Image (spheres, rainbow, N blue to C red):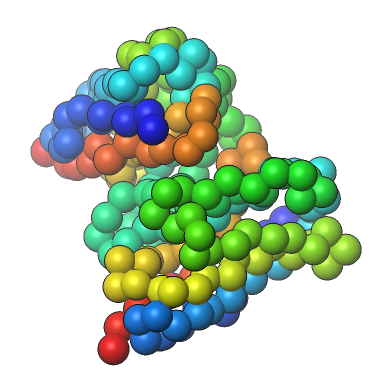
Amino acid sequence: EIVLTQSPTTLSLSPGERATLSCRASQSVSKYLAWYQQKPGQAPRLLIYDASSRATGIPARFSGSGSGTDFTLTISSLEPEDFAVYYCQQRSNWPLTFGGGTRVEIK
Amino acid sequence: EVQMLESGGGLIQPGGSLRLSCAASGLTFSSSVMNWVRQAPGKGLEWVSSITPSDDNTYYADSVKGRFTISRDDSKNALYLQMNGLRAEDTALYYCVKHPWNLWGQGILVTVSS
């Protein structure tokens, strides 16, 4: 099973600041890494797939990068609605796995 | 409107069985890989199971293998999860998710408790 480790666990930032979230895989997942955003009481929303492709309707301030074992989700300038929990997911190998999540909170 | 709606959850005693259903509308269901994901209260996301089009292949997390069975009825645009031998650790909100993972249901709560 591929283990995904997200860091940091919590990120405290102010609106307008840049957020950088990390996801590290225990073995290579090639480009098959996705990012999701989840707000309280809501289902997760797909942000990024294949490491760097934005899903339909996702603002350009969200970007993904990386390949192999190290991936990054960047939010260039935080909007109030971006404070949420973010998960990475690998779709390279069965079983599919998720990271433990990074909470982006208002400082 | 494109949506997926889960049903069949509830409170069940340990060792019991439940069958979750997911009804899809406004979309083409038959050609898509379909998935179940769960989230225990206050915890992260856990992939549970996936099924390819035409039931060619099914996949399960080790935590549910041998107890849960995923199936689909493309004529009804429906996805199912038969859950047997339920345990307290199966307590979670269960989501159905359509590949490419951009469409999620609202989730259905399963609580396993005596």
Q: Is residue A18 left or right of residue B101?
A: left
Residue A21: x %, y % from top left: 27, 25
Outermost residue to the right:
B75
The N terminus of chain A, quarter of image:
top left
- For the point 76% across and 50% down, the residue is B55
- For the point 28% across and 89% down, the residue is B114
Residue B41 higher or lower than B9, as above or below: above
Query: Looking at the image, how many numbered discs can be counted on the residues?
Result: 0
Outermost residue to the front:
B66
Residue A102 higher or lower than B74, as above or below: above
- For the point 32% across and 30% down, the residue is A4
Residue B112: x %, y % from top left: 35, 78
* Res A51 visible: no
Q: Is residue A34 left or right of residue A39?
A: right
Residue A66 higher or lower than B98, as above or below: above
Q: Residue A2's image quarter?
A: top left
* Res A89 visible: yes
- For the point 65% across and 66% down, the residue is B80
The C terminus of chain A, quarter of image:
top left
Q: Is residue B73 left or right of residue A102?
A: right
Residue B96: x %, y % from top left: 58, 57
In this orientation, which residue lies closer to the viewer: A76 or A99?
Answer: A99
In this orientation, which residue lies closer to the viewer: A39 or B114?
Answer: B114
